Image (cartoon, grey):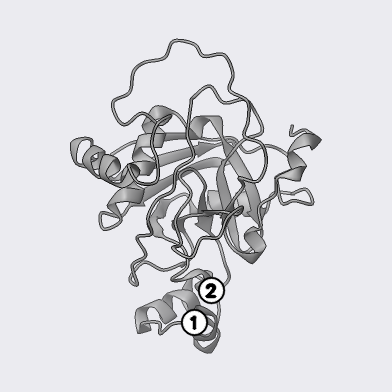
Amino acid sequence: MRTSVFSAGRLLLGLGLLAACNQAPPATAPTTARPVVPGPDLATLTDSAAPAALLAYGKQYPGSEVLVKTRLGNIRVRLYDDTPIHKANFLLLARKGVFDETMFNRVVKNFAVQGGQTYNARTIRLKRYRLPPEIRPEHFHHKGALGMARYDDEQNPGRLSSNTDFYFVVGEKMAPFQSQAMAGRKLTPAQVKAYAAVGGVPSLDGQYTVFGEVIEGQDVVDKISNEPVESDKWPVKDITMKVEVVK
């Protein structure tokens, strides 16, 4: 279970999707020998170096689908080709085992479930770096969309993404006039129809990068969304994960 020392570092997902970085980073546990995984060194990546390094990695080591395994079931996700930096970053961190040391750390019912943080010591050295936005109007926050959060301890007019904090949209169904009013931009007829049929969170459109979607296991996302949470929205019972590239 989570100890109280972590409660000082909170996410403000109810006001937006933000990564927790105002708390002290978890200590790094003693390392043990692990298989060498090709790709950029996560301990040295920077904001400026990450885009080119990740694009090169994505071309050399492509992938399109990942499986997120939890105690509540599995979530299969398709990653979008037209968000290549976010896609390559997610593939790299999955293959390096970074997500396997994290859990779902922010759960807001009927809004979204967010993962990528931990209160445990990390064994994988990981430097904080940000990703340039890849916001595409055709990728919107319907139920099941996969997006990347942002750091909460800095001004971020460029809408740069966190490198580790991701979220799945839950949301609610809404009438066309509601989704259009919340979106703050002109929705296409197909998007309006999707928000009415399956639901989502149109207020996030254009604010965060959506780079994939759930293709199997949306019921698992819904189960996570309904888990009891503490005052800071961290699940009472930890929901750890294992993320595997499957295609």
The answer to which of 112 and 199 lies nearer the viewer is 112
Q: Is residue 169 above or below residue 184?
A: above
The amino acid sitting under disc 2 is Ser
Q: Position of residue 184 (x, y in %)?
A: 49, 82
Q: In this view, does 163 lie above or below 1?
A: below
Q: Quadrant of residue 76?
A: top left
Pointer 2 residue: 203
The answer to which of 10 and 108 lies nearer the viewer is 10
Q: Is residue 208 above or below residue 236?
A: below
Q: Distance between the residues labelled 2 and 1?
A: 7 Å
Work out which residue is located at the far bottom of the displayed protein and give it.
Answer: 177
Chain-order first, disc 2 or disc 1: 1
Work out which residue is located at the far left of the displayed protein and give it.
Answer: 60
Question: Circle 1 sits in a helix, a strand or a loop, which is it?
Answer: loop
Q: Which residue is drawn at 63% across and 30% down?
A: 26
Question: Circle 2 sits in a helix, a strand or a loop, which is it?
Answer: helix
39 vs 97, left or right, is left
Q: Where is residue 220 in the image (x, y as percent from the top left)?
A: 54, 48
Q: Residue at x 40, y 35 (%)?
A: 94
Can you see residue 225?
yes
The amino acid sitting under disc 1 is Gly
- Image disc number at residue 184: 1
Can you see residue 63?
no
Q: Residue at x 40, y 31 (%)?
A: 44
Question: Given contact means CB atoms under 8 Å apart, are the residues at marks 2 and 1 in contact?
Answer: yes
Q: Where is residue 6 in the image (x, y as percent from the top left)?
A: 73, 38
